[in-house]
Image: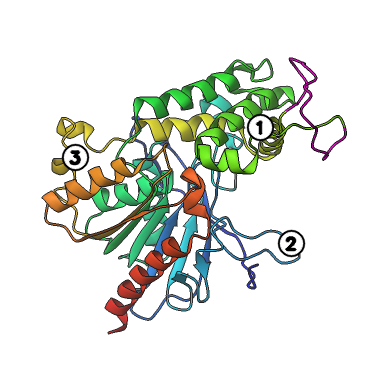
Amino acid sequence: MSSFEVVPQSMSFAQALPLRSGASLGSYSLAYETYGTLNAARSNAVLVCHALNASHHLAGVYAGQPKSEGWWDNMIGPGKPLDTDRFFVIGVNNLGSCFGSTGPMDVNPATGRVYGADFPVVTVEDWVHAQAALLDALGIRTLAAVMGGSLGGMQALSWTLQYPDRVRHAVVVASAPNLTAENIAFNEVARRAIVTDPEFHGGHFYEHGVIPQRGLRIARMIGHITYLSDDVMNTKFGRQLRSAVEGEVAGTDYRYSTQDIEFQIESYLRYQGDKFSEYFDANTYLLITRALDYFDPARQFGGDLTAAFASVSAKFLLVSFTTDWRFAPARSRELVKALLDNRRSVSYAEIDAPHGHDAFLLDDVRYMGVVRSYFERVAAEFQS
């Protein structure tokens, strides 16, 4: 459990942010948190980018909320792999999110109505530009490192492409240079579950005082299946049945019902879906999964990933996990090859772990050791 308290912050920007779609946000706010102390040379800043359903709350707890640990609390903090006794760590909530930064739940100043479905489409590149604006306001020109897992790893990659002179290191975990067709398909099925929910109302459900919870539940269940490996599901749940008595494992007799929860995996998925539908915004889900789909830095180079990364100057650590079938090790190896083709400095670790995509959030000793060792090298550069 984390032992330090943190305070969320917010910064507003009056200058319009041009978006890749051609639209722009006339004004916006970003929620963020910082951990550790910025050194006098301002050379020890590390930006950590979040994945789909996470936020700027990376580590620590909020005062009076003992169960409020940040989503990467095992990775970030005093004495942890990303050591806040050495580094000044920044977490930023992406635009379009529902955790404090400007998003679909906010009022559009141009109309006086809640954005809802009218919130403009945002991309990974747009998020990076907004993050850069925040760093400018904080007086941070150069990052010791940018780090992220999954969608956060895509943002880290984008930083090295959009601002090559501002990033010294990039730590990219369980990520990919783009989504496969299968991944896009999973995202589309989840989006259809939301937009076909009768309570969605074309994305303007706020005005009706309802939430498309049914769609959100299904979207989360679909996503959660893809985050876990088959081994983990079988080990944790197998084909165990639930009895009519809550929490009691049934024997071998089926009830032969088409609607009751019979298997423990069903109970688990419904629990995850119910919990997600209570705190996440449907329009945010649509926006963020679209940003995932659109990310493809090689697209403007005819699919040539080596050409896409020709301009980067950062050093890289890439980490993948053997049972992660959503962001498979082969996708990280594509990045490794592209970077080596450009004679860039690359460290690569492929961790044999049974946990699937969720492994990047867990406490695998080898994984944590690799990240700790890499950040010790990063720290040596500005401490020497």
| Residue at (42, 63) in percent of width and height | 366
Which residue is disc 3 drawn over? 305
Which residue is disc 2 drawn over? 65
Question: Which region is colored magenta?
Answer: 245-262
Which residue is disc 1 drawn over? 239
x%, y% of residue 99?
Answer: 60, 46
| Few, some or many residues within 10 Å of mark 1 (<14, 14–19, 20+) | some
| Few, some or many residues within 10 Å of mark 3 (<14, 14–19, 20+) | many
Q: CA distance from mark 3 to mark 2?
A: 45 Å
Question: In what element is the residue under mark 1?
Answer: loop
- Taking the image as drawn, is residue 284 in sight? no
Which of the 4 image quarters holds residue 243? top right
Amino acid, disc 3: Leu
Question: In what element is the residue under mark 3?
Answer: helix
Amino acid, disc 2: Gln
| Residue at (50, 66) in percent of width and height | 76
First in sequence: mark 1 vs mark 3: 1
Quadrant location, the C terminus: bottom left
Q: CA distance from mark 1 to mark 3?
A: 43 Å
Q: Residue furthest right?
A: 245
